Image (spheres, rainbow, N blue to C red):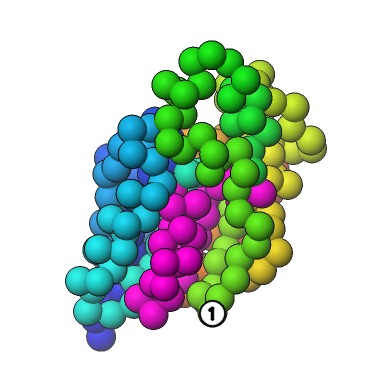
Amino acid sequence: MPVERVLLIHGLWLRGLTLGPLGRRLRAAGYAPQAIDYASVLHGPERAAQEVMDILSRCDGPTHLVGHSLGGLVALRALSMSAEHCVGRVVCLGSPLAGSAAARGLGRFPLAPRMMGRSRRSLAEGIGSVEGRVEVGSIAGTRALGLGRFFGRMQGPSDGTVAVDETRVPGLADHCTVHASHTGLILSRHAARLTVAFLREGHFRGCATGAEAAGAL
């Protein structure tokens, strides 16, 4: 039986190597992860989505997509470019699918164009809904450690950068929370286990929060 591939997509200001811990856990679970690296500020999600499409076009079979923060929006942008036949399932980690209050707040500062570049609009607006045949799951963090809370007024629990409510949109196959910060989502063992569960079954089996997710960062 061929090994299922997983394409890992990083978020704003990060690089592909930051997804190394998540990639190792996916590999231990029997998957073949590959992290892409793109210029999130200079080129933004449009070019990154095209890069994802180019990789998918060379795949022998369906490939799963796992995106952190902006990376989740990139994954869904690629899906909208008629990539459904190439994709198995999609997991978004801390992605502001409903738009980010922190990004909108940061956008009011003079240096915003340099800090967010071509990704500014996607982060501020998010997407309206998830449509299509590909199952999409969203994992949100509830440990509010991050600078985002200083730029935008987030309602309810958050990971310090993205509010839990900002990770929900109509059409998701499943939604789950873990006690992790925004960056901690890509380091969290619990988030990795949930990601594996969704890639295998299409839902977050064993979802837990708070003390039950003490292994998360």
Q: How many residues crowd around disc 1 within 10 Å: few (fewer than 14), some, or many (20 or more)? A: few
Instruction: Classify residue 186 as left or right of residue 19.
Output: right
Q: Position of residue 182 (x, y in %)?
A: 54, 36
Q: Classify 101 as above or below 34.
A: above
Q: State yes or no: residue 70 in magenta.
A: no
Most foreground residue, 59 or 21 = 59
Do we see residue 128 in this rendering? yes
Name the amino acid type tagged 1: Arg
Most foreground residue, 134 or 49 = 49
Q: Position of residue 106 (x, y in %)?
A: 59, 23
**Which residue ends up furthest to the top in the rendered image?**
110
Residue under the point 48% across and 44% down: 70
Segment tinted magenta in the rendering = 71-98
Corner quadrant of residue 99: top right
Most foreground residue, 11 or 20 = 11
Residue under the point 68% across and 33% down: 101
Q: Classify 82 as above or below 156.
A: below
Instruction: Classify residue 97 as left or right of residue 24.
Output: right
Do we see residue 188 in this rendering? no
Q: State yes or no: residue 76 in magenta.
A: yes
Instruction: Classify residue 120 as left or right of residue 126.
Output: left
Looking at the rendered structure, the number of numbered marks drawn on it comes to 1
Quarter of the image for the N terminus: give it: bottom left
**Mark 1 = which residue?**
133
Residue under the point 28% across and 80% down: 61
**Which residue ends up furthest to the bottom in the rendered image?**
1
Corner quadrant of residue 33: bottom left
Q: Position of residue 90 (x, y in %)?
A: 48, 65
Q: Classify 100 as above or below 76.
A: above
Residue under the point 44% across and 52% down: 74
SS of the residue under disc 1: loop
